Image: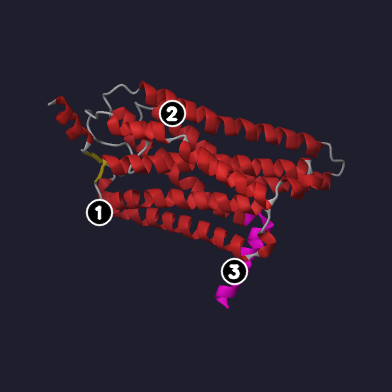
Amino acid sequence: MSTLSDSHINSSSFVLTGVPGLEVYSLWLAIPFSSIYAMVFLGNCMILHVIRTEPSLHQPMFYFLAMLAFTDLCMGLSTVHTVLGVLWGFIQKINLDFCIAQSYFIHGLSFMESSVLLAMAFDRYIAICNPLRYSSILTNDKIMKIGVAISCRSSLLIPPVIIRLKFLSYCRPHVLSHSFCLHQDLLRLACSDIRFNSIYALFLVIMNLLLDAVLIIISYIMILHTVLAIASREERMKSLQTCVSHICAVLVFYIPIIGLTMVHRFGKHLSPLVHVLMGNIYILFPPLMNPIIYSIKTQQIRRRVQKLFSLKVV
C-alpha cells in the first residue's frame, strides 16, 4: 500500500508559478517575455551565423564565443515552452519526469556556461601573457578537446543528483516557485531523506561554479600583472579592451546565480514575486545580454553584424 502511495505521489504533476499577484495581467506580461525570448534566439543565432560565415573569425576566441552562444541558445530552448506556456495560459502543470528532465538541462547548461567562461578566461590569459605561443597552444585540436571536456563535465556529473529526484516522495503542496523546474525547488517539496541531494549538489556547485569563478579571478590577476608591466599606456589600454566583453559576460552570468542562491537560501520570508523575478533573471539575463555585449564591445563582431544588416537593407 505504501509503495502504491509513493508511486501515486511521484507520478503527480506540479503546478508552475507565473507571476504571483499579477495573474490577471499574464497575457500582457507574455508579450515582453515573448519579445525577450525572440531576442535571445535571434541574437545568439546571429552570433553563431556570423562566426560560421566569416573566415576572419575562425580563431580560438570566437570559437569559445560560439560555444557560449550555443549554450545560451539551448538555455532559452529548455525553458521557453513552460515560461511562455504559463503566461499565455497554455500550460499550468508539469509532470515529474518532464520536470526532472528540464532541471537537468537548466543546471547542466549553467555548468556548461561557467566552463565556457573559464575557457574564455584562459584564452585571454594566453593571448596577453604569452602572445608568441598563442597559436601553438590554442590549436583547433586543443579547442575541440576543451569543448569535449566542457560537455562531459557539464553532462556527466549531474545525473546522480537529478536521477535521485525520481525516487523521492513529494508530500508537500505541489506548487513550484517558478515557471520552470529547478533541483532546489523540487527538494523543497520532498519529504524523503534529501541529504545525498543536498551534499552532492553543494559538491557540484563548489567543483563547478565556485572553482571556475576562483580560476577566472586568478587568470585576471595574472593578466593585470602582465598588463601593468607594459610601458606604453596605449598598449595597456588596448590589452585590457580585449577583456572587457568577457568580464561583462562573467558578471552577467555570476551575479544572477548569486542572487538566486541567496534568495533560495535566506529569502524564505520574501515575497514569491522576488523568487520569480530572480529565477527569470537567472535563466534569461545572460542569454539576452551576451549577444548584445559582444556585438557592441567586440570590434570584429560589430563590423560583421553591421555588414550583415546593411546587406539585408539593400
Considering only order in the chain, which callout, 1 or 2, is on the residue closer to the N terminus? 1
Label annotation for residue 308: 3
Q: Amino acid at mark 1?
A: Phe
**Structural distance between the alpha carbons of marks 1 and 3:** 36 Å
Drawn side of residue 183 relative to residue 117, left or right: left
Q: Which residue is mark 1?
A: 90
Which range of residues does the magenta coloring cover?
296-314
Considering only order in the chain, which callout, 3 or 2, is on the residue closer to the N terminus? 2
Q: Residue at x 22, y 31 (%)?
A: 173
Q: x%, y% of residue 101?
A: 35, 43
Q: Amino acid at mark 2?
A: Ala
Considering only order in the chain, which callout, 3 or 1, is on the residue closer to the N terminus? 1
Q: Secondary structure at mark 3?
A: helix
**Structural distance between the alpha carbons of marks 2 and 3:** 43 Å
Label annotation for residue 201: 2
Question: Around disc 1, counting alpha carbons within 10 Å, would you say few (fewer than 14), some (14 to 19), or many (20 or more)?
Answer: few
Q: Secondary structure at mark 2?
A: helix
Quarter assignment of residue 231: top right
Q: x%, y% of residue 214?
A: 61, 30
Task: Please state which of the two labelled residues, at mark 2 or mark 1, is closer to the viewer.
Answer: 2
